[in-house]
């Protein structure tokens, strides 16, 4: 018995030939037999076997054995290869390809139900007409007023000259005033200077577009010897930021200036306090610790009352 190819088998049955028993056996052995030639699972997984046929069941078992179906969160795919995942935690280090929102069950409806992009003044309320999106603080009516305060923490050396000069040191000598606002302001200069006879003038410098519609205040100046009692005092009502001499020439070693008033701005900018001596005072010339300036914003530049006033 032997297996033969089709050409050899056909020769057994040529016209006039009578096949022998052995040739019939070769014919039978050369064809698959449904019962005897079916591959077992062992045969299917043996790559040396090349004369067995596979049934679908054996084929599936072989595929599962060599390429098992992976599970996701211990869930096997359904008949269509899909896996339903719930309660997923953690994160993926890399994701390739793309997934549309419609491909994820329920995601599109969830996204469509989310709140719209927030836009100040459209679906977010403003405060006093100002948007709440951004950085910084917003002034709110009824809250504590906005204050600008400078209190030098050291004795500040002034120039020994008769040129206009800043009254406070750098870092606390420029006050940023807002547009269309009204301010209370007050302050005190504690000055220690030489004994050369001189007058003292107060002024304010406007910069970066600041425009002041009205500035009315009262200044008081008094002088004395070091740690002495004042013997002269002068008070003067001043209009505007321009320089105003406050006293007659004096040789006193200490001078104190106090001021208080109201100003109204129409545009924002910087206000800088200045002093001018009629001549160089001589000796040490200082703004002493304890000096201060304070601006308190009370409302718009046309405000007349705050609170229950009629």
Image (cartoon, rainbow, N blue to C red):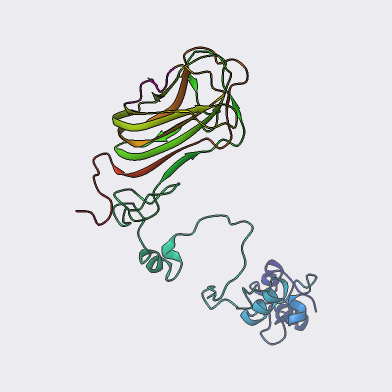
Can you say which quadrant of the picture contains the N terminus? bottom right
Q: For the image shown, how many numbered marks are present on the structure? A: 0
Residue 5: x %, y % from top left: 71, 69
Secondary structure mostly seen in the magenta stretch: loop
Q: Is residue 272 left or right of residue 281?
A: left
Of the pair 137 and 259, the residue shown nearer to us: 259
Q: Residue at x 80, y 70 (%)?
A: 48
Residue 247 within the segment the image draws in magenta:
yes
**Residue 148 coordinates in the image, percent (x, y):** 45, 40
306 vs 117, left or right, is: left
Outermost residue, left direction?
310
Image spot of residue 197 (x, y percent): 51, 14
Query: Which portion, as a residue range, is magenta?
Result: 240-248
Residue drawn at (63%, 74%) of the image: 71
The image shows residue 264 at horizontal and vertical percentages of: 30, 35
Find the residue positioned furthest to the bottom: 35
Q: Is residue 268 visible?
A: no
Q: Is the residue 60 above or below the residue 275 in the image?
A: below
Of residues 281 and 239, the one nearer the viewer is 281
The answer to whether 83 is drawn above or below residue 273 in the figure is: below
In the rendered image, residue 168 lying in the magenta stretch gets the answer no
């Amino acid at each position: 018995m032997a297996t033969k190819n089709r050409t050899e088998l056909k020769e057994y049955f040529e016209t006039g030939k009578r096949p022998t028993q052995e040739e019939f056996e070769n014919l039978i052995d050369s064809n698959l037999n449904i019962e005897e030639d079916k591959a077992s699972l062992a045969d299917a997984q043996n790559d040396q076997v090349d004369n067995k046929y596979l049934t679908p069941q054996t084929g599936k078992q072989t595929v599962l054995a060599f390429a098992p179906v992976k599970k996701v969160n211990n869930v096997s795919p359904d008949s269509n290869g899909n896996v339903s995942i719930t309660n997923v935690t953690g994160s993926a280090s890399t994701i390739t390809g793309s997934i549309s929102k419609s491909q994820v069950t329920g995601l599109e409806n969830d996204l469509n139900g989310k709140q719209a992009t927030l836009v100040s003044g459209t679906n977010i309320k403003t405060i006093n007409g100002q948007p709440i999106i951004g950085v910084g603080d917003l002034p709110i009516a009824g809250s504590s007023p906005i204050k600008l305060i400078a209190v030098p923490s050291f004795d500040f050396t002034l120039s020994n000259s008769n040129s206009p000069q800043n009254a406070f040191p750098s870092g606390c000598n420029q006050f940023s005033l807002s547009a269309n606002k009204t301010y209370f302001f007050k302050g005190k200069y504690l000055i220690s200077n030489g004994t050369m006879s001189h007058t003292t003038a107060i002024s304010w410098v406007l910069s970066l577009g600041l425009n002041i519609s009205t500035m009315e205040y009262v200044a008081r100046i008094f002088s004395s010897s070091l740690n002495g009692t004042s013997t002269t005092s002068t008070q003067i009502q001043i209009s505007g930021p321009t320089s105003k001499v406050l006293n007659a020439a004096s040789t006193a070693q200490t001078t104190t200036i106090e001021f208080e008033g109201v100003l109204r701005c129409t545009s924002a900018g910087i206000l800088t306090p200045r002093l001018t001596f009629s001549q160089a005072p001589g000796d040490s010339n200082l703004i002493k610790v304890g000096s201060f300036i304070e601006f308190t914003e009370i409302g718009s530049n046309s405000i007349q009352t705050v609170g229950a006033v009629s």
